């Protein structure tokens, strides 16, 4: 659960572009950090079907990726290891994602 979240998206054919601003709650949770509630499930190739950007100076190593058919984006570091909710605790992030919608 986020402290605050806003977003918008545009879908043209199978291409989805989504903009977001998310504030994470104060937490020590070691659960994987994710951007959830995407408007459409993601199609991906080897878990890398998403191009995204996260804007926050303390999270420069944060990357996005997705697994096919999921309605969420994983937040990982440059090495591909999952970031945790604690890594994002109290931070507000903003960004944009571009991805292909999975087949209906």
Image (cartoon, rainbow, N blue to C red):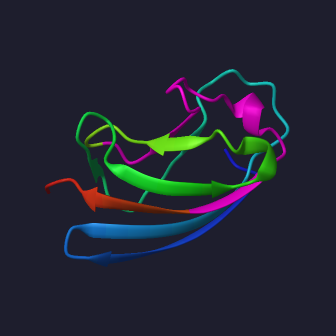
Pick the residue in front: 93 or 80: 80
Q: Position of residue 83 (x, y in %)?
A: 63, 29
Pick the residue in front: 45 or 22: 45
Q: Position of residue 7 (x, y in %)?
A: 57, 69
Q: Decide if residue 18 is on the left or right side of residue 58.
A: left
Q: Quadrant of residue 5?
A: bottom right
Q: In which quarter of the image is residue 12?
A: bottom left
Q: Is residue 41 above or below residue 96?
A: above
Q: Decide if residue 34 is on the left or right side of residue 14.
A: right
Q: In this view, does 17 lie above or below 40?
A: below
Residue drawn at point x = 63 percent, y = 24 percent: 31
Pick the residue in front: 81 or 32: 81
Pick the residue in front: 98 or 57: 57
Residue drawn at point x = 53 percent, y = 25 percent: 79
**Quadrant of the image containing the C terminus:** bottom left
Residue drawn at point x = 23 percent, y = 40 percent: 45
First to last magenta residue range = 70-95
């Amino acid at each position: 659960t986020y402290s605050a979240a806003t977003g918008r998206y545009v879908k043209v054919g199978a291409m989805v572009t989504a903009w977001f601003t998310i504030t994470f709650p104060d937490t020590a949770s070691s659960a994987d950090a994710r951007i959830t509630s995407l408007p459409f499930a993601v199609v991906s190739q080897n878990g890398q079907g998403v191009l995204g950007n996260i804007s926050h100076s303390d999270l420069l190593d944060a990357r996005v990726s997705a697994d096919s058919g999921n309605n969420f984006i994983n937040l990982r570091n440059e090495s591909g290891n999952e970031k945790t909710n604690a890594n994002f605790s109290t931070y507000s992030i903003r960004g944009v994602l571009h991805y292909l919608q999975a087949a209906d």
